[in-house]
Each structure stands twice: as structure tokens, then as C-alpha cells.
Amino acid sequence: MTRLSVYSLDGGQKLDTRDPACIAGALAPLGVRFEQWPARPLPADADPAAVLDAFAPEVARLQAENGYRTVDVIRMTPDHPERAALRAKFLSEHRHSEDEVRFFVEGAGLFMLRDDAHVHAVLCEAGDLISVPAGMRHWFDMGPHPRFTAIRLFIEPAGWVADFTGDAIADRFPRHEPV
Ligand SMILES: CSCCC(=O)/C(O)=C/O
Ligand SMILES: [Fe+2]
Ligand code: NI
């Protein structure tokens, strides 16, 4: 179930909630957009084109709002050959020059969003739309046995571009531990 846990930078826990309205309300002051949209089941063999086709109305709505020029699909399974390398890449704290817009359509993954005083752990699940503002330090944990599909929307034609901070902060905070 979608969840927000907030930690102070020294690791003390300040908030833990599974209430979607509370999650959205706690993230909004950070400039983070969080909404829940209905998700629909996908065939196990759905390729990126099929995923985009299944969620064409949602993608069109987001593109109409913000003119995203590049849209892709990331689908991770526990046997994905690059799961360890991709997990390590996203676990490195980074930021982007544009908002990070993700619509989760299957499974779950953990976003860790850092501001001056806190780390906000947002466990995103199917149906969750999140937009992390440009410049916000963050990392993402898909866990050792990843299972999620997310639609990613970019203004930048090149798609995913990150500025890694070099800070190993992720090592000091909880990881995604799927049940
Ligand atoms: C949930 S989409 C994969 C992770 C990603 O694109 C990113 O930038 C994480 O911070
Ligand atoms: Fe990112
Ligand atoms: Ni904060």
C-alpha cells in the first residue's frame, strides 16, 4: 500500500502514513505532486508500446498539461538481467534539471526525497502519479527483486539525464523491502 515515511536527516522518524490525502498534503509544500489515478491490469507480456497504448488517455492528459516531448516505459521484473546495475544507479543520490514525472502502472518502488531537514520516503504503487521538482535531491530503490512498471515523461528530448551528487546518503536510510 502506498506509504509516506518522513525522517529527519539524522534518521529519526517524524511521520508515517498510508492516507493518500495526507501523503499529497505533506508533499505539496515541497513542490512534489502526488495523485492517485485508476490503474488497469496489463498483460504479463505487455511491451512498452502496449503499456503506452493502455494508458494513452493519462499520458495525453499529462502531455496537454506540460508538453512532455519524450515518454518511455520502465518495466522491471525480478529476473531482469540489469536489475543490480539499474538499482545501484538509481540508489545514487541525484537530481534532474526538469521535474521527474512518473506514473506507476504496476508494482511498487521507493522514492527518497531530500530537503534541507528531512528525507521523505514515498512508496509508490500502481495508480500513483508523482512529480519530483527539478533540482530536488533524491534517490530511488527498486529493491533486490524489483517488480514495477512506470511511465516516465520528459521535457528533455534525451529523456533521463541525472546530475549525481556523490553523497552516499542512501546508505543511511531504509531500503525498499518488498513483502
Ligand atoms: C521510477 S522510474 C525509474 C527511476 C528514475 O527514473 C529515477 O530518476 C529515479 O530517481
Ligand atoms: Fe531521478
Ligand atoms: Ni521536510
Image (spheres, rainbow, N blue to C red):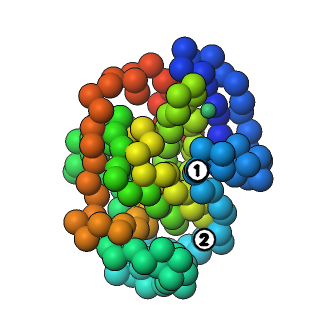
- Residue at screen point 50% across, 82% down: 64
N-terminal label among 1 and 2? 1
* Front position in the image: 103 or 40: 103
The residue lying toward the viewer, choosing from 2 and 163, is: 163
Element type at mark 1: loop
- Residue 5: quadrant of the picture: top right
Q: Is residue 153 left or right of residue 117?
A: left
Q: Would you say residue 65 is visible in this rendering?
A: yes
Which amino acid type is shown beneath numbered disc 2? Ala
Disc 2, SS: loop
Residue indicated by mark 1: 31
Residue closest to the eye, 87 or 178: 87
Point out residue 137 in the picture as x, y percentages from the top left corner.
Answer: 42, 38
> Residue at the spot x=58%, y=51% of the render?
32
Which disc, if any, is residue 39? 2
Residue at position x 49%, y 51% in the image? 132
Is residue 48 shown to the viewer in this render?
no
Horizontal relation, residue 20 to residue 31: left or right: right
Position in image of residue 4 (x %, y %): 65, 40
Residue 2, above or below 59: above
Location of residue 16 with respect to 142 vertically, above or below: above
Looking at the rendering, in which quadrant would you find the C terminus? top right
Label 1 beta carbon within 8 A of ligand 3: no
Is 177 placed above or below 99 here?
above
Q: Position of residue 78 (x, y in %)?
A: 36, 49
Amino acid found under the numbered disc labelled 1: Gly
The Cα–Cα distance between marks 1 and 2, rounded to whole angstroms, is: 24 Å
